[in-house]
Image (tube, rainbow, N blue to C red):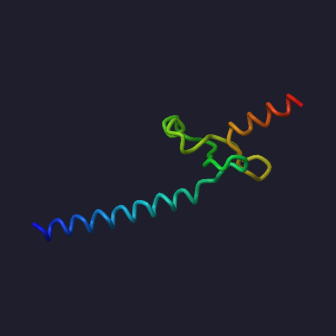
Amino acid sequence: MARLNHVISSFTKTFKKHHISKINMVKNLIPTCSKCGSFVSDHIEPEVEKEGQIKEGKYVDNVWVCNECLKNKHLDMNTK
């Protein structure tokens, strides 16, 4: 029984290590907003956006900017 627990524990640690590694690899592929640093994409599913880890945005003038920052920039320009 102790051997089985050791095997399960080792498997769990290895799985978590590889899972975290894959998550970090994917995060490195997702662009970030040049204004706020949030992960951004030009098209994301509503469920993903609702979770709040990735924002929808645009690639403008060779940089990624989330829609929230674009909106704020637009509001700032109108108030000047």
Quarter of the image with the C terminus in it: top right
Answer above or below: position of 30 versus 45: below
Image spot of residue 28 (x, y percent): 57, 60
Answer above or below: position of 26 versus 47: below
Image spot of residue 1 (x, y percent): 10, 66
Answer above or below: position of 26 versus 56: below
Relative horizontal placement of residue 41, taking residue 79 as reference (left or right): left
Image spot of residue 19 (x, y percent): 40, 60
**Rendered image quadrant of residue 15:** bottom left
The residue at the point 62 percent across, 46 percent down is 41
Q: How many marks?
A: 0
**Rendered image quadrant of residue 75:** top right
Which residue of the protein is positioned furthest toward the front in this rendering? 2
The residue at the point 66 percent across, 50 percent down is 37
Image spot of residue 45 (x, y percent): 52, 38
The residue at the point 76 percent across, 46 percent down is 60
Answer above or below: position of 13 versus 45: below
